[in-house]
Amino acid sequence: MSEETPVEETFISHLIELRDRLVKASIGIAIVCAALMFWPGPAAIYDIIAAPMLASLPTGSKMIATGVISPFLVPMKVTLLIAFIVALPWVLYQLWAFIAPGLYAHEKRLIAPLVISSSLLFAAGVAFCYFFVFGRVFHFISDFSPSSIAVTPDIENYLDFVMSMCLAFGATFEVPVVVVVLVRMGIVSVAKLKEIRPYVIVGAFVIAAIVTPPDVVSQFSLAIPMWLLYEMGLLVAPVFVKATQAPKEPV
């Protein structure tokens, strides 16, 4: 029977470590999800998510459910999504704990701020979408709708729209982190990123036109923050690069 080589043992140990980290991340999400189901509950959570749409409809209007199990399944999906967002710092911490042993001390100083900033920026993007974008988009659609049409959104279609928009804005708000990582890894310099700024601005509006509804309000609401966050990344990147440089060896 052949013995395992050190390389094979290391690879297997990494797989076991990855499995353990994924299990811990999943347990964290499950705990948050169970807590949300206990309070405030899936029904109450969906009512909160639906509030921007209901506010744009005539008084007393409600959404409809065309599926038999939709009134049960859709609130459960919303609860799971909220649980993932709340548990995101724990998930990112497990990712950091997995890769941290292979990093130098000066590189580890970059990971912790990135984990914290990534979590905060993603949550900020979702909050910005919910509190600022949804109300304006839904009122715009409601005002544009002809009086001969009764707007009664289906809860599943509404959930798909909300999830796609929240994920789009959450991912968009990660732009500063992407800029910092690209500069820190030496893939591109800050000077080059400043040079291509006009193309980035155009790209922001193209991306916004693709991932948002075909109305000016939502497109500008995504494109302008994307551009501003890009500028923030250009300002922060040199600071991170300087703080995470390897210490100079004594001559």
Image (cartoon, grey):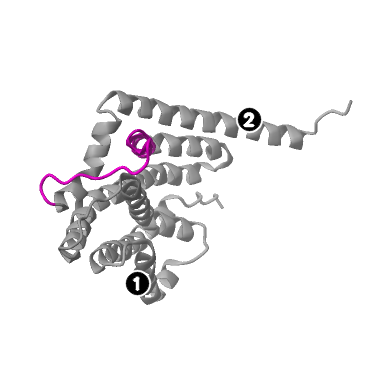
Dot 1: few (<14), some (14–19), or many (≥20) neighbours within 10 Å? some
Please report the residue visible at 49 percent of the width from the left and 39 percent of the height from the top.
Answer: 96
Dot 2: few (<14), some (14–19), or many (≥20) neighbours within 10 Å? few
* The disc label shown at residue 201, or none: 1
- Marks 1,2: beta carbons within 8 A: no
Q: Could you tell whether 18 is left or right of 11 in the image?
A: left
Tally of marks: 2
Front-lying residue, 64 or 2: 64
Front-lying residue, 130 or 174: 130
Amino acid at circle 2: Ile
Amino acid at circle 1: Ile
- The residue identified by callout 2 is 16
Front-lying residue, 38 or 197: 38
Asked if residue 239 can be seen in this view, the reply is no
* Image x and y of residue 170, in percent: 35, 51
> Does the magenta-highlighted stretch encompass residue 65?
yes
Position above or below: 197 against 68: below
Region rendered in magenta: 58-85
* Image x and y of residue 21, in percent: 53, 31
Please report the residue visible at 48 percent of the width from the left and 42 percent of the height from the top.
Answer: 108
> Which picture quadrant has residue 139?
bottom left
Asked if residue 236 can be seen in this view, the reply is yes
Q: Residue furthest front?
A: 148
Q: Quadrant of the N terminus?
A: top right
* Image x and y of residue 33, in percent: 37, 29
Please report the residue visible at 42 percent of the width from the left and 67 percent of the height from the top.
Answer: 190
Position above or below: 192 against 142: below
> Does the magenta-highlighted stretch encompass residue 68?
yes
Q: Secondary structure at mark 2?
A: helix
> Which picture quadrant has residue 137?
bottom left
